[in-house]
Amino acid sequence: MIMVLMAILLGGGAIYQSHQQAKETAIGHAANITLVMQRGLQRHAEFFCSVLDSIGERYRQVLHFPVSGSELGSFLFTGGQANRYIVETAVLDKHGLLVSSSRSSPALLTNDFSDAPFFQAQQNADSPAGKLFLSKPIQLAKDYFVVVLSRRITDMQGNFAGVAMMVLDLAYFRSMLEGVDVGNNGILSIYSRDATVYVRIPYDPAMVGRNLSSAPMLDSFLKQDSGHFFWKSVNDGVERLYAFHAVPGTNLVVFVGYAKSNIYNYWQKTLAILIIGSILLIFSALSFFRSMQSEFLRRHASEKTLTTLATIDGLTGLINRRSMDELMERHWQHLREGTLRQLSVIFIDVDFFKLYNDGYGHQSGDLVLAQVAAALRTSLARNEDGAARYGGEEFVVILPGSDAAGASKVAERIRAAVEHLALPHAHSRFGVVTISLGVAQADLQRHAQAEQLLAEADQALYAAKSAGRNRVEISSAS
């Protein structure tokens, strides 16, 4: 009897821990799913921005070197619609009037957009030149919605010259969410910061464009960049665990919701088994403890895998910017404590990459970045050396224990490895894909923070590009 009571007491502790573990694991899974979706949306937003910026740059050239009307459209929109969800791209002049469109019949059925929010937001003198504006959903037909993205165009003097705009099928958002399994009564959704619904899975067209700012809890969480909470939905009455992440550079917030009943469903079943097993036989209780241990290990392994995915850049396989910052801070602390004597960094940029993307397409550009990353990785001889994708076509290599001279040799090895790939680049004067590299060595008397060392390497990179590209430059201060 005493052993049975002990088993029940031990089982009670295990039950409590299991309840907490189920909650924490669900929170971790939900947060990782929103993080993956956030980064997917951010990557696509950068692509859409690059398309609009290319159009804007061509229009800036047209302002100074006019192109005949029959050739204007083909000049402005060459290679501008590599994504099947892009319905239309267009250019508006500084008065909001349509200059040219990629379609013979504009999707929004008007030539005057002077009153449109996506034009006025860019026309505003206080609007940053690089700001991407995303409109609220616009219904063009039954169950057919689009959104408009816009970027400000300035002339050579920096004055407002017009707007590059893109009409995007809202099915793009659905395509990103519908493949994610969140269980029975689970939901996925994308809101704007002002609580406007862009898409909700399971899909309901009646929800598109609806504003839910009247829901106090939702409105307060949309002001934050990330987090989680439990909330009973006013729409279907289901209580869920919600996790969310804001998408940098946009006004969008990604949500995932797990039904609370699903989170604790497994825990409730194991509770019943444990009570029956404790009453009947201690052996049954011991067997249950073993099964719980296996489940804990499985969940821990799954969470560890998701955590790894959140620290690695999916395209190149290198560590991402966030992980690089953490690694840099650790080395910087060791340098300040004296346990690391030297530290150097290499800043890398792919030469003429924007021209490559314009000429060969975004997908080919992604393949080039992956191949450059592979060449970079194989050029590093030591396990302690770190390589990261800094953003876009930029990479950073961290070399603990190396001075500027040693780092420059590594940089030259990387440069030669990329050039040896012989990836064709018709828009580069070298004929192949090349890189420029800047090297800087840490000096605690000159650098108060790690960011200053990176900035010095970036300046050296700029010097390499100014000197003709496809070369290594060491910071003059190193």
Image: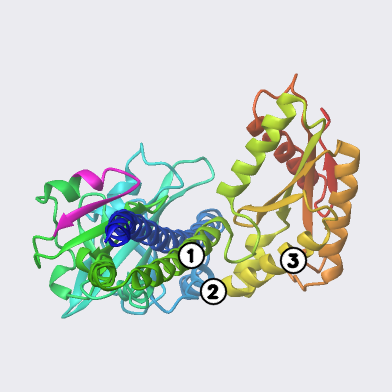
Task: Please provide percent x and percent y for residue 351.
Answer: 73, 57
- Across and down, in percent, residue 58 comes to 54, 61
Instruction: Residue at 46%, 75% (x, y): give it.
Output: 83
Amino acid type for the residue under numbered disc 3:
Ala
Q: Pick whichever of labels 3 and 2 is earlier in the sequence.
A: 2
Foreground disc of the pair 3, 2:
3
The residues colored magenta run: 220-232
Q: Quadrant of residue 359?
A: bottom right
Q: Which quarter of the rendered picture does the N terminus lie within? A: bottom left
SS under mark 2? loop
State the mark number for residue 274.
none
Residue at 39% across, 54% down: 247
Q: Can residue 110 be seen in this view?
A: no
The residue beneath circle 1 is: 297
* Residue 8, quarter of the rendered image: bottom left
Disc 1 residue type? Leu
**N-terminal-most mark, 2 or 1:** 2
Tag 2 and tag 1, C-beta contact below 8 Å: no
| Foreground of the two, 274 or 69 | 274
The residue singled out by tag 2 in the image is 79
**Residue under numbered circle 3:** 374
Q: Of residues 264 and 324, which is closer to you in this image? A: 264
Sequence order check, earlier mark of 3 and 1: 1
Which of the 4 quarters of the picture holds residue 151?
bottom left
Kindly state the secondary structure of the residue where label 3 is placed: helix
* Residue shown at the point (74%, 29%) measured from the top left: 335
